[in-house]
Image: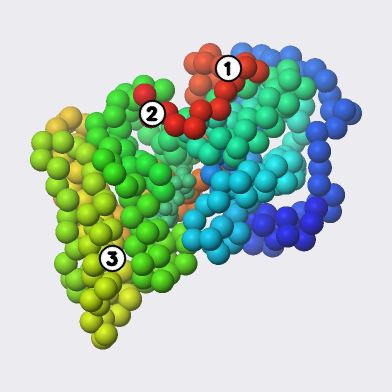
Amino acid sequence: MTQEMTNALRYIGKADYSGPSEAPILTPEMPSHKSYSSTPASLILGLETSCDDTSASVVKNGSEILSNIVSSQIDIHAKFGGIVPEIASRKHVELINPVIQEALDVAGIGFSDLDAVAVTNRPGLLGALLTGVSAAKSISAAMEIPIIGVHHLEGHIYANFLINPDWQFPFICLVVSGGHTDLVVVRGHGDYEILGRTRDDAAGEAFDKSARVLGLPYPGGPVIDRLAASGNPKAVHFPRARLDDTLDFSFSGIKTAMIRFFEHKPADMSVEDVAASFQAAVVDMLVNTSLAAVERTGIRRLALAGGVAANSGLQARMREQAEINHIELNYPPPRLCTDNAAMIASAGYYHLINSRMDDLALDTIASQPLR
Ligand code: ADP
Ligand code: MG
């Protein structure tokens, strides 16, 4: 393993990573047969390569995380101000085998202990998805274990079961990430109904683009979150889009407002105040529409998912409103909100126990709404 790869590897919650010195590969000495039993007790390898994180995780019985390795490419893409798909694909190819090996090592198991492999196969960057899906197919074929394709957003939703396996159906989930802003009713495992979604930019995209206007590094969400903590949220009034009679969102207006504001920014206005004001407006839109979804459906159980769900302002406002409105609230810790493979393994587990498996013909799909 190169130093660059070692540096890029980051085991969640484990600061002093020291990885194996050789990049492991799928070798012919691997046991060639494992009989699959339908007993639900299972060890699932999850793989996630849909965007710019190469991640592998071993999860037991859908919620017990034995390992969750995330190798972020953020440093590489940051200098371009966003994800460069071709670079992402090449990095996934370099990192996927060492990341898988590290996930197995940390979990203290070998390939032959796995009961199934779950992989994000949709939606995402095609070249990036292909790396994870090819690795999953190799493992499935070599070990004779089921392969399960997981929708990326479904994975985000299932991060809620990682922290709370007793979380009950039905619930409403606000899925907010760099590419998506969806309000979903989840009635049972794999049973989704979209109540509303963004008509233009995703919430994460609004954070990232506004951060860029402010001269802040990519990805902008965590940076704005940090700055907002010491800013005045009432310093600037940014517009809150309300799309009457729908549960849809729109973030293009606030992005344009940020560009206009910055052109005439008062010299004494601090970046903390702008960040806090911007975040307050985005949080208002997300919280108000989620509360409207609760009222409309009568479902008083709300979950948060996706990278933007890590936002401390969003979590605080949701906690406050959940208490006032008697809503049960569930959300994962930040490291399980952003892209990771444990959430994919968890979703895969519930497919497995409901006998929803795929085969080696599993395809990659660039764009597909959750349904
Ligand atoms: P993807 O969009 O590729 O699925 P994630 O689900 O990890 O990836 O979401 C990444 C998005 O989440 C980025 O737009 C990033 O700015 C945003 N994000 C991450 N942490 C925070 C935070 N604390 N506050 C606001 N946005 C955040
Ligand atoms: Mg994501």
Left or right for 325, reference 17: left
- Which amino acid lies under the numbered mark 2 shown in the image of this protein? Leu
- Which amino acid lies under the numbered mark 3 shown in the image of this protein? Ile
Near-viewer residue (303 or 209): 209
Residue hosting label 3: 259
The residue depicted at 74 percent of the width and 36 percent of the height is 109
Give the x, y percent position of residue 152. Answer: 48, 35
Q: How far separated are the C-alphas under marks 3 and 2?
A: 32 Å
Q: Quadrant of residue 176?
A: top left
- Frontmost of labels 1 and 3 is 3
Give the x, y percent position of residue 187. Answer: 32, 24
Residue hosting label 2: 370
The answer to whether residue 97 of the structure is visible from this angle is yes
The residue depicted at 70 percent of the width and 46 percent of the height is 95
Q: Taking 322 as reference, is 355 above or below it?
A: above
Label 1 neighbour load within 10 Å: few <14, some 14-19, many 20+:
some
Left or right for 326, reference 174: left
Residue 358, numbered label: 1
Q: How far separated are the C-alphas under marks 1 and 2?
A: 17 Å
- Which amino acid lies under the numbered mark 1 shown in the image of this protein? Asp
Label 3 neighbour load within 10 Å: few <14, some 14-19, many 20+:
some
Q: Taking 44 as reference, is 337 above or below it?
A: below
